[in-house]
């Protein structure tokens, strides 16, 4: 390059400027250089695509863009370079370029690199690449070259994919809408059905309550009918004609009671309110009980009732109440449709397919059942039409079917017209009914009793031990209350109360030997009264019989949970009530008398062992009472204090009479007799220790007289203290003392 010489420039008249330089003279015409000239139009030559790197070497693809209006690329071909130029190569050094990628930005950018521009990571879409030129230092040309560049989206963003998404979304929306509406409909149906079921259940409960209340109202007058009728039937003062009439009335009343019970039981089975309560007992005994009842009530002389049993003892788990109801219905049906011949009731073991069953059968020689009717006899309210149709409710056999199903058994029937009908009921011999309620096993054992001998006179504060037992009758119905009182006046001292509150007050005042109470009463019902009596230490030992028309399993459970000892349903037999009272009092007496029984071998049973045996059958409060009174006696003797009924009354916070009746009821002994028992127990303990003489032992147990002590010891153990010790150890107390 030449170097200009300073101060060597000049200008001529034409405006040409001259410059001196080391290489000679240079000149130019400014008007020519500054003349406005149109820049040539740019030509877009090619596009170079940079493919994704799949190997260590990069791959490039070139596409010519000459004479093309557009180019379409794949979604991964979004990195590329565009080259451009002009046709006049002489102006190549003097031309400048500016570009714009419309769709990405709306601004023009001057090209830095000569004749090309690079774009990277362009998103899918449609673009327009525009390029324009200018002569350096002049204005940009109005002519613009352009080409359309389309980058295809990935397949998941393609139009058809979006259409699929739209269709799928729409479908899902409508499916969701349908599911939601279906859910709403189902919830509505569920709520409607639930509400309907609740209403139906409430209606069924209301019906059951109605049946229960009606039964209660019907059973109450029936009690007053059946009770006196039974007394008249057993009476020998009636003429044969009157006796027959009374028997007919009695049978009609019994039939009315059976119909009432039948309707109620059927209602229970329909509403699933009847629950199975099984006990392990002798099925033969139950069959004989039911069969003998119908033998006595049979008024048809041409019909013979036969009772047969394969074995005298057939023990298995069964619900006695359910089996009784089933047999009652089957036998009564047989009597209804049989004019002459026999009715055979049989119980036996049968084995079928290796499975053992207890089979009950009721066979008659009656009219029989037609083939068409045989398939419908267990349907409710069904009655066979014909000349032999008898009156009835049409629910007897339906009830039988429901009860057999409840008992997990099977019932079948065989019948021929004018020959007879036989019903077969089968129960699994080994079924223990794990899902049913279980009561106490039916026992038949009897216990022997011994008369107690008392050697000590009672103090004047203690009641007369020969007085009659006190029975408290709590019943709101005055007629029934008077009937029970009249029935037991000869045997017991009867006290009465009209409600539970009054009964509770009387019971705590007089401490009766037994309480007979209704449940449904005003002011305070029998359940609450029972709970309060069993929660009071003064009265917790008193046996309670609940006498009511409420006979469901739930009602019985509630009664027994309240502490009741027995449960009788109305209408009741006075003789049955008498038996229950007698049994409860006898059981209490036998239990208490075990305290007073002198062991044949003194080394076999101590007082502590006897007390442990007795207390096992006591409730919690009675056990606490016995422990408290025994400890009170022992502690008083340990401090050399005199122990009598007055001291114990203060300790137990009871009156002397209440304490006496409580101790008497639990132990069978008077208070003083029990004190003496505890003293003899301590004496036995001291005697076996071998540390004290007879006189010292007598003093330690609160007896000042050695003679009286020896007498008491001999009465308790059947021998003198010396003989007792010698029998146990082989040495007398005197010998032991000598050894010391």
Image (cartoon, rainbow, N blue to C red):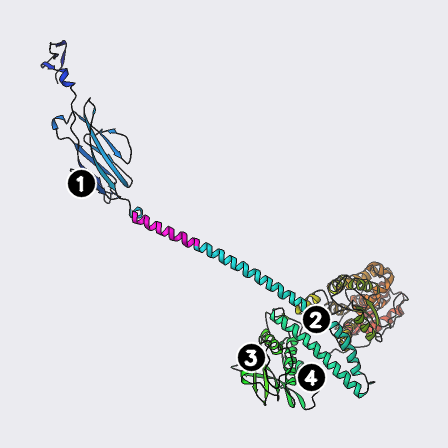
The mark closer to the camera, 3 or 1, is: 3
Q: Which labelled disc corresponds to residue 294?
A: 4
By secondary structure, the bulk of the magenta-drawn segment is best described as helix
Q: Which labelled disc corresponds to residue 63?
A: 1
Sequence-first tag of 4 and 1: 1
Q: Is residue 644 visible?
A: no
Image height of 292 relative to 213, above or below: below
Sequence-first tag of 3 and 4: 4
Q: Are marks 3 and 1 in contact (CB under 8 Å)?
A: no
- Relative placement, left or right, of 364 versus 251 is left
| Residue located beneath label 2 in the image | 215
The mark closer to the camera, 1 or 2, is: 2
Image height of 424 relative to 510, above or below: below
Q: Residues within 10 Å of mark 4 (few under 14, many from 20)?
A: some
Q: Quadrant of residue 584?
A: bottom right
| Residue located beneath label 3 in the image | 376
C-alpha separation, residue under disc 4 versus residue under disc 2: 24 Å
Helix or strand or loop: what does disc 1 sit on?
strand
Q: Name the outermost residue toward the top.
A: 7
C-alpha separation, residue under disc 4 versus residue under disc 1: 116 Å
Q: Position of residue 373 (x, y in %)?
A: 56, 82
C-alpha separation, residue under disc 1 versus residue under disc 2: 105 Å
Magenta-highlighted residues:
159-177
Image height of 619 relative to 168, above or below: below
- Relative placement, left or right, of 723 versus 293 is right
């Amino acid at each position: 390059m030449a170097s200009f010489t300073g101060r060597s420039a000049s200008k001529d008249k034409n405006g040409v400027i001259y410059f001196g330089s080391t290489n000679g003279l240079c000149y130019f015409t400014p008007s020519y250089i500054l003349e406005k000239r149109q820049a040539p139009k740019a030509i877009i030559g090619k596009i170079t695509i940079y493919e994704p790197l799949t190997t260590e070497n990069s791959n490039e693809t070139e596409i010519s863009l000459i004479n093309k209006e557009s180019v379409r690329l794949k979604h991964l071909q979004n990195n590329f370079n565009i080259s451009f130029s002009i046709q006049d190569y002489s102006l190549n050094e003097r031309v400048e370029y500016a570009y714009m990628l419309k769709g990405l930005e709306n601004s023009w950018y001057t090209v830095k690199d000569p004749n090309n521009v690079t774009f990277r990571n362009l998103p899918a879409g449609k673009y327009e690449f525009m390029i324009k030129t200018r002569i350096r230092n002049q204005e940009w040309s109005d002519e613009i070259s352009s080409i359309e560049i389309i980058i295809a989206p990935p397949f998941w963003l393609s139009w058809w994919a979006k259409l699929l998404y739209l269709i799928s979304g729409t479908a899902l929306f409508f499916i969701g809408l349908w599911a939601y509406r279906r859910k709403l409909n189902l919830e509505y149906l569920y709520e409607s059905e639930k509400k309907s079921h609740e209403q139906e259940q409430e209606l069924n409960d209301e019906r059951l309550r109605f049946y229960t209340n009606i039964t209660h109202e019907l059973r109450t007058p029936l009690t007053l009918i059946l009770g006196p009728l039974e007394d008249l039937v057993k009476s020998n003062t009636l003429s044969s004609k009157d006796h027959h009439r009374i028997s007919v009335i009695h049978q009609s009343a019994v039939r009315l009671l059976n119909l009432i019970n039948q309707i109620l039981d059927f209602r229970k089975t329909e509403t699933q309110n009847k629950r199975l309560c099984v006990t392990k007992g002798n099925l033969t005994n139950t069959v004989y009980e039911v069969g003998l009842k119908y033998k006595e009530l049979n008024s048809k002389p041409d019909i013979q009732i036969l009772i047969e049993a394969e074995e005298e003892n057939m023990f298995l788990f069964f619900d006695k109440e359910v089996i009784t109801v089933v047999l009652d219905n089957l036998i009564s049906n047989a009597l209804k449709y049989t004019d002459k011949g026999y009715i055979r009731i049989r119980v036996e073991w049968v084995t079928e397919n290796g499975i053992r069953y207890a089979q009950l059968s009721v066979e008659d020689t009656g009219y029989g059942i037609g083939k068409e009717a045989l398939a419908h006899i267990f349907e409710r309210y069904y009655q066979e039409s014909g000349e032999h149709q008898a009156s009835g409710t049409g629910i007897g056999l339906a009830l039988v079917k429901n009860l057999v199903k409840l008992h997990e058994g099977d019932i079948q029937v065989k019948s021929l017209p004018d020959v007879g009908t036989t019903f077969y009921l089968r129960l699994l011999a080994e079924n223990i009914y794990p899902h049913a309620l279980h009561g106490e096993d039916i026992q038949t054992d009897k216990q022997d009793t011994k008369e107690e001998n008392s050697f000590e006179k009672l103090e004047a504060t203690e009641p007369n031990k020969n007085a009659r037992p006190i029975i408290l009758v709590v019943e709101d119905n005055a007629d029934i209350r008077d009937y029970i009182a009249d029935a037991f006046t000869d045997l017991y001292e009867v006290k009465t109360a009209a409600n539970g509150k009054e009964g509770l007050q009387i019971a705590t005042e007089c401490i009766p030997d037994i309480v007979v109470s209704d449940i449904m009463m005003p002011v305070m019902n029998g359940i609450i009264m029972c709970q309060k009596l069993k929660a009071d230490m003064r009265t917790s030992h008193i046996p309670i019989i609940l006498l009511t028309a409420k006979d469901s399993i739930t009602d019985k459970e509630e009664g027994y949970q309240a502490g009741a000892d027995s449960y009788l349903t109305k209408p009741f037999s006075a003789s049955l009530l008498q038996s229950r009272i007698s049994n409860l009092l006898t059981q209490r007496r036998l239990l208490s008398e075990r305290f007073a029984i002198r062991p044949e071998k003194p080394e076999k049973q101590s007082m502590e062992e006897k007390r442990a045996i007795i207390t096992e059958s006591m409730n919690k409060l009675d056990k606490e009472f016995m422990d408290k009174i025994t400890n009170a006696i022992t502690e008083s003797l340990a401090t050399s204090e005199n122990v009598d009924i007055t001291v114990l009354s203060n300790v137990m916070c009871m009156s002397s009479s209440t304490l006496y009746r409580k101790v008497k009821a639990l132990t069978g002994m008077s208070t003083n007799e029990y004190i003496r028992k505890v003293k003899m127990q301590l004496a036995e303990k001291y005697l076996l220790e071998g540390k004290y003489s007879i006189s010292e032992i007598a003093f330690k147990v609160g007896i000042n007289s050695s003679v009286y002590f020896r007498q008491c010891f001999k009465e308790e153990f059947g021998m003198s203290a010396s003989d007792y010790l010698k029998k146990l150890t082989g040495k007398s107390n005197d010998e032991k003392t000598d050894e010391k």
